[in-house]
Image (cartoon, grey):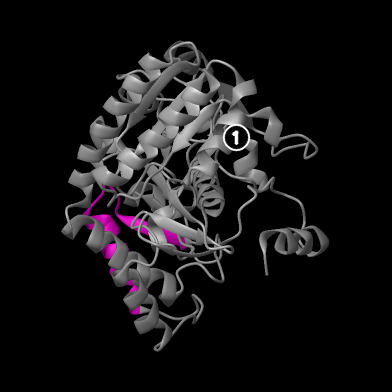
Amino acid sequence: MNTDTLRSKFERYVMSTYSRFPVALVRGKGSWVWDVEGKKYLDFTSGIAVNSLGHSHPMIIKAVQEQSKKLIHSSNLFYNESQVELAEILVKNSFADKVFFCNTGTEANEGAIKLARRWGRANGGRYRIIAAHGSFHGRTMGSLSVTGQKVYHDGFKPLVPGMKFVGYGKVKSLRKALDDSRVCAVIVEPIQGENGVVIPPRDYLREVRELCTEKGVLLILDEVQVGLGRTGRLFAYEHTNVVPDVMTLAKSLGGGVPAGAVLATDEVAVHFTPGSHGSTMGGNPLAMHTASVFINTLIGDGLLDNAARMGDYFLDALSSIGAKYKGMVKDVRGMGLILGVELRSADMGPELFSSCLERGFLYIPTVEKVIRILPPLNVSTEEIDFALEALDCAFGELS
């Protein structure tokens, strides 16, 4: 089946919720993927930050094979050792005392919202949640309601009530919003990925934490995209020494298998009681065992250091390209291996992407004019150099 035939079948049988790139991928190895026609591409989308060990990593393959021979699913009506194994790893490597497991990032943020409201009910009947403009927390109704981008709201109103938005990185507006005694929580991304790799001011998270503590409200950090090594630390909050009350994880957590989690302190977690929340597939043995193998590999193989080192190398080189083509590039930014190149005009975005695609380099065009780059955490300098050459040539064609 070629790409045109596959595209035709998609249009016939699959709902059109995505504007897909004109590529049909059939296999991958490491940082590379191949399409149905056999063309090879450097994949710096990583499945939107999911495939942090690249494609077909031997430890992930082994974990899936081993667990699938034992038990894939049993439901949360029973104990399973894979779930407690992963929970222990997460607790021992984070601020948290307890973990709730689900399948995706939007489910994790739904769980965090529900947990915050349960906590709020027990602490004066609070229910309002403050989120940031430009944020992205998911597409289900609760997480959509704290997503600060109107484009995702179109056609779905009324959203869940009780949510308020303030400027990202703007402490003054947050301070004013926290004067509302009905607020139970603030939810924020350490870096806004979907909004174009937006990095807040250096002291922002610390000031948010101080305000939440002062006002007695919960701080929820959404680390669905930036957690688990993406920034060069296991969790992005570690760069600031800020400790949240609740944190959400997903994307790379399962090593490519769907997995999500809500982490919380005992003081907050106690408000989830039997029957208050749940997930049929969440915490299934296949995802849990694979996630444990992923995190142990991430920590044990020195990939956090590699992500930090390769991120510095990549950011420096991208900055040089930005300076070379400053008439087309407005900004270059990033932390670890989440990187963004902001174009001066959205008009050049499609042509630039097509040029890189032709050269075998895949990235994610974000908010129309930001090149979002998410390499696997085990990426090499040679692979980064391939991407840099493709970008340099593509910019050169447009200049």
Residue 300 visible in rendering: yes
Local crowd at mark 1 within 10 Å, few (<14), some, or many (≥20)? many
Q: Which residue is mark 1?
A: 147
Q: Position of residue 248 (x, y in %)?
A: 43, 48
**Closest to the observer, 305 or 189:** 305
Q: Position of residue 122 (x, y in %)?
A: 49, 44
Disc 1 element: loop
Asked if residue 96 is among those painted magenta in the image, a careful observer would answer yes
Picture quadrant where residue 52 is located? bottom left
**Closest to the observer, 284 or 99:** 284
Left or right, residue 376 beside residue 45: left
Q: Position of residue 374 (x, y in %)?
A: 41, 42
How many marks the image carries: the answer is: 1
Residue 271 visible in rendering: no
Q: Position of residue 399 (x, y in %)?
A: 51, 17
The range drawn in magenta is: 81-101
Picture quadrant where residue 293 is located? bottom left
As drawn, which residue projects farthest toward the bottom? Answer: 69
Above or below, 260 relative to 324: below
Q: Amino acid at mark 1?
A: Thr
Residue at the spot 32% in from the left edge and 20% down from the top edge? 320
Which corner quadrant holds the N terminus? bottom right
Residue at the spot 18% in from the left edge and 44% down from the top edge? 305
**Closest to the observer, 245 or 133:** 133
Asked if residue 99 is among those painted magenta in the image, a careful observer would answer yes
Residue at the spot 78% in from the left edge and 36% down from the top edge? 157
